Image (cartoon, rainbow, N blue to C red):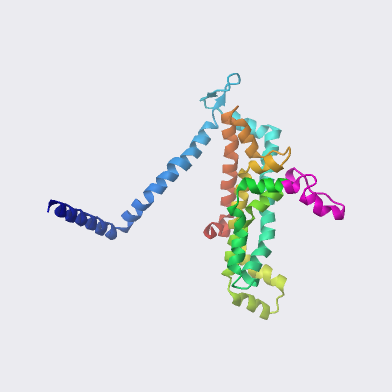
Amino acid sequence: MTTDVTTAAGRGTVRRLAGSLHRRPRLRLTLLLTAPLLWLAVLYLGSLAVLFVSAFWTTNSFTSQVVKVWSTDNFHELFTTPVFRQVILRSVGVALAVTVLCALIALPVAFYTARVARPKWRPLLVVAILTPLWASYLVKVYAWRLILSEGGLADWMLAPFGLSGPGFGLPATVLTLTYLWLPYMILPIHTALEQLPAGLLDASADLGARAGRTFRSVVLPMVLPSVAAGSVFTFSLSLGDYITVQIVGGKTQLIGNLVYSNIELNLPMAAALGTVPVVVIVLYLLAIRRTGALNSL
């Protein structure tokens, strides 16, 4: 009997609590978001804050120990040393090149999968495009290392034309990163084209516009926010990558390689280098915010 009374009391408490939460949607939303927001604030934003603060520390040149003394020497060296400036500009250039290549390839591919292919094949084509994302990152990069190596598949395919593959270096890095992040560009463009009203294309054709004019005046303005949304992934992922350039980049160095090489010897300098991609990506997001890309993510 005592157990039944306790169970009934517990159920009554749960009902009153549920009723109270039902009448207070803001409280319900607050309780729902508290845990993930704390996780974001403590682990993600907190780690970025620690990274930024440690960038103002220095390192003892004799013992390589971190000295927690406030100084801007790391940032001064970062922007006055030619090697650092070249690597930063090269990293941004690689990220932009990968983004442009992904957009140029993704537009016709997404147009075919969304508007040209038969409806029953479209889901299968989307799955085929996303399939490379299921494979291991290192497997894909080492596969491209074999393709681009001397005597590899690239040399074999270009040999009849008297040409050879790019080998290892900056072009190989851009090519490999383009392959890795291309699905992130195709998917949002495919979604935008799939939602594009067919009546707009028919109206453009009825008014005498050719395919090129229809693409420039109708299709491109509609999918531009999705292109910008995809560029957020391709740009940020390329800017922060350092493994691909180690495997297929030859002697090329990007900013991620400098961060990795300075972690053990000069942690504050590594932190200062690590703030550069964060600042560049924030500026990039602010630049494309007006396109509506952030609403398409």
Residue pictured at 61% horizontal, 47% vertical: 137
Residue at left offset 60%, top offset 42%: 277
- In the rendered image, residue 166 lying in the magenta stretch gets the answer yes
Residue plotted at (44% across, 45% down): 40
**Residue farthest right in this picture:** 162
Position of residue 4 relative to residue 109, above or below, is: above
User: Position of 19 compared to 212: left or right?
Assistant: left
Write the start and end of the magenta stretch as one range.
146-172
Which residue is at the front of the view, 134 or 250? 134
- Given residues 96 and 101, the one toward you in this image is 101
Up the image or down, 195 lies above or below 248; here it is below
Where is residue 121, by image quadrant?
bottom right
Residue 241 highlighted magenta (yes or no): no
Image point (62%, 60%), residue name: 129
Q: Is residue 7 visible?
A: yes
Give coordinates of residue 12: x percent, y percent. 19, 57
Query: Which is nearer the eye, 137 or 49?
Result: 137
Q: Position of residue 159 (x, y in %)?
A: 84, 52
